[in-house]
Image: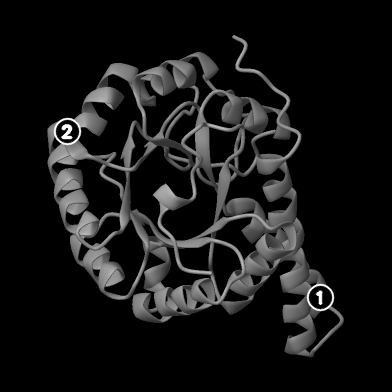
Amino acid sequence: MPLVNLNELFDPTRERRAVGLFNVAGLEFAEAMIEVAEELNTPIILGVPERFFQFSRLENVVRLCVDMAERARVPVAVHLDHGKSFDNILRALRNGVSSVMFDGSSLPYEENVARTAEIVRIAHTMGVSVEGELGYVGRGDFDPTDPSFYTNPEQAADFVAKTGVDALAIAVGTAHGIYKTTPKLDFERLKSIRQKVDVALVLHGGSGVSDEDFQKAIACGIDKINVFTEISVSVIKTVSEATSNCSDWIRVTGEMRRTIANVVRHYMTVFNTGLDHDCDL
């Protein structure tokens, strides 16, 4: 199965499903994720976040994911996640990613537009899709209930028209990391953005959102959902428990893989089945 970009994963008829992006923090992660995708016969996106490169060399992680994607039995995209460095984006492109994200959400609007458009121009010549971000999906440094951080629907339409992005990460009430309070998604805003924007819409900060809210968000127009924190927390718990009574690292990594697979399987099932919600606001 060939490596694909984001445009080849999304259904232009807007069927009520979303493709999951799961971040790869090592070989066991990528193997478990692709195995579940093949088991469920469902496309998947392997995310390679720029912030991981402080611990792992970009070329090593990207080539690992690209090689595994090219041998998978289901469509797989390899996506540079939250790229902020122009140099890292170029390095990822040279090493075979099929999609990149430029995260200019913290920049002044016009600078975000200009820099995103330049990356789109370069990536599209290589057949690589580009995701931009508008609004602010932070971590623990902001109040996810404050609408001033949210994506403005009119500005979203202007951003897409001026940049030519293939996907747009929007802020509608989610946050990266562990939630301090129960997330409350602004479905009315999401619906308005969907009506004004004809590219794929992306929900970041998926860990901690309820299954019901995921399915409603998909019904209202979300095409791609990013998940990592729940995988990370579950793996840390598994390793802690496994190493308390085992000194065989191979057995521990086996437990890690089972944990990763279980979390990914749950989310992929939620994103792709039982989507009986309507975007009834």
Q: Residue at x 64, y 65 (%)?
A: 33
Q: Nearer the viewer, residue 120 or 151?
A: 120
Left or right: 206 as drawn, with respect to 197: right
Front in this rendered view, residue 136 or 221: 221
Q: Which residue is mark 2?
A: 162
* Residue 117, quarter of the rendered image: top left
Q: Foreground residue, 241 or 47?
A: 47
Residue neighbourhood size for the residue with mark 2, other residues' Cα within 10 Å, grouped as few (<14), some (14–19), many (≥20): few
In the displayed structure, 201 sits above or below 98; it is: above
Secondary structure under badge 1?
helix
Query: Would you say 132 lies left or right of 111 here?
Result: right
Q: How many C-alpha atoms fall within 10 Å of the one at disc 1: few (<14), some, or many (≥20)?
A: some
On screen, residue 159 above or below 36: above
Residue 103 horizontal/vertical position (percent): 30, 47
Side of 142 where 133 appears, left or right: left
The x and y percentages for residue 98 are 37, 62
On the image, which quarter does residue 56 sit in?
bottom left
The mark that comes first in sequence, 1 or 2, is 2
Disc ID at residue 57: none
Residue 237 is at least partly visible in this image: no
Q: Position of residue 133 (x, y in %)?
A: 33, 39
> Residue 71 in the image: x percent, y percent?
55, 77
Q: CA distance from mark 1 to mark 2?
A: 51 Å
Q: Name the amino acid type tagged 1.
A: Ala
237 and 87: which is toward the camera: 87
Residue 160 left/right relative to 74: left
Amino acid type assigned to the residue bearing label 2 in the image: Lys
Q: Which mark is residue 242?
A: 1
